[in-house]
Amino acid sequence: MQNSRSRSRPARAAVPLLLRWSVLLAAVVGWEAAARAHGSVYFPPPLRIARHAHGLWFSGPLGHLFLTRAAVDTILPSLGRMAAGFVLAAVAGIALGIAVGRSRRAYALCNPVLQFARAVPPPALVPVFVVVLDFGTPMQVASIAFSALWPVLVNSAEGARATDPLRLEVAAVLRLTGPERLWFLVLPSALPRIFAGLRLSLSLSLILMVFSELLPGTADGIGFTLTDAQTRSDLLTVWSALMLLGVLGFLLNTGLLAVERRLIGPGRSS
């Protein structure tokens, strides 16, 4: 009886996964059928797009992880800029957010500024960084980091403020030091909100990465590939870049969710 229950648990766990992938498969099949029925050059079938993307970026030798030279010149620079901006935003946002959230006075003073900065559309800030830093990688990384900072900062501050006061009183009775309270009480309490902010910042980083590469002065990256393919009316490459962005977003978010579950468990993840 117990063995049958243990065997049925993986089957029950696999049902939601199969349902999610079946919806995606149905969407792709519907797209394929509609594109072939319409026969428009502006609306190619997904299988044709996938073959073009494979030949363009993922048909390289095994020693290069199947990446072609075009993939190295297109995907890696974009991921490097995005990673640099996201890491800067995450480190600064968590540190500043925890500091602001643990002080009532600091939170009261900074909250209007935080809410104002969070409400500004991130792409609107890119021209400001162009004026300050000119075109190039520093401008791109700075615009990604600045725009992705605010969700992490605000959520970290809210998470730090939500620490149970009773636990803090117990920590005071036990004479825990400030760093010990931060490590054992504040950070574990704030982690669900911190990861919620990190997921928002990850999406913003991907958006800002592409947007910054659409500007003049960029010679590589996915955004540059989009602009270049559009000027050459290479619609298959345009669609391939869009599909690549969707896959990258899904993989990055899945990886961040795996880290979140590893640190705080599936029951407490937001």
Image (spheres, rainbow, N blue to C red):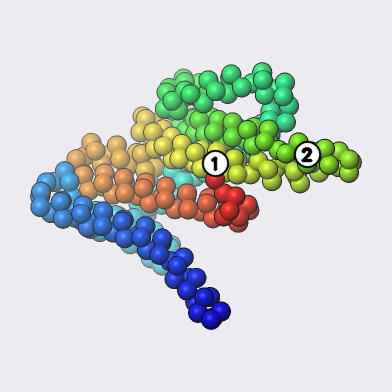
Looking at the image, residue 16 sits to the left or right of residue 96; the answer is: left
Residue at figure coordinates x 75%, y 43% from the top left: 185
Identified by mark 2, the residue type is Leu
Mark carried by residue 166: 2
Residue at figure coordinates x 50%, y 30% from the top left: 147
The first of marks 2 and 1 along the sequence is 2
Q: Tell me where residue 74 appears, x and y as whole percent.
A: 38, 47
Label pair 2/1, CB-CB below 8 angstroms: no
Position of residue 27 relative to residue 42, above or below, is: below
Label 2 Cα crowd, 10 Å radius (few <14 / some 14-19 / many 20+): few
Total numbered circles: 2
Identified by mark 1, the residue type is Ala
Looking at the image, residue 234 sits to the left or right of residue 151; the answer is: left
Where, quadrant-wise, is the C terminus in this rendering? top right
Mark carried by residue 256: none
CA separation in Å, label 2 and label 1: 25 Å
Q: Secondary structure at mark 2?
A: helix
Q: Can you see residue 92?
A: no
Label 1 Cα crowd, 10 Å radius (few <14 / some 14-19 / many 20+): some
Residue behind mark 1: 196
Q: Nearer the viewer, mark 2 or mark 1?
A: 2
Residue at figure coordinates x 47%, y 49% from the top left: 253
Q: Tell me where residue 216 appears, x and y as whole percent.
A: 36, 29
Q: Can you see residue 222?
A: yes
The residue lying toward the viewer, choosing from 14 and 24, is: 14
Q: Write down the quadrant of residue 30 in the picture.
A: bottom left
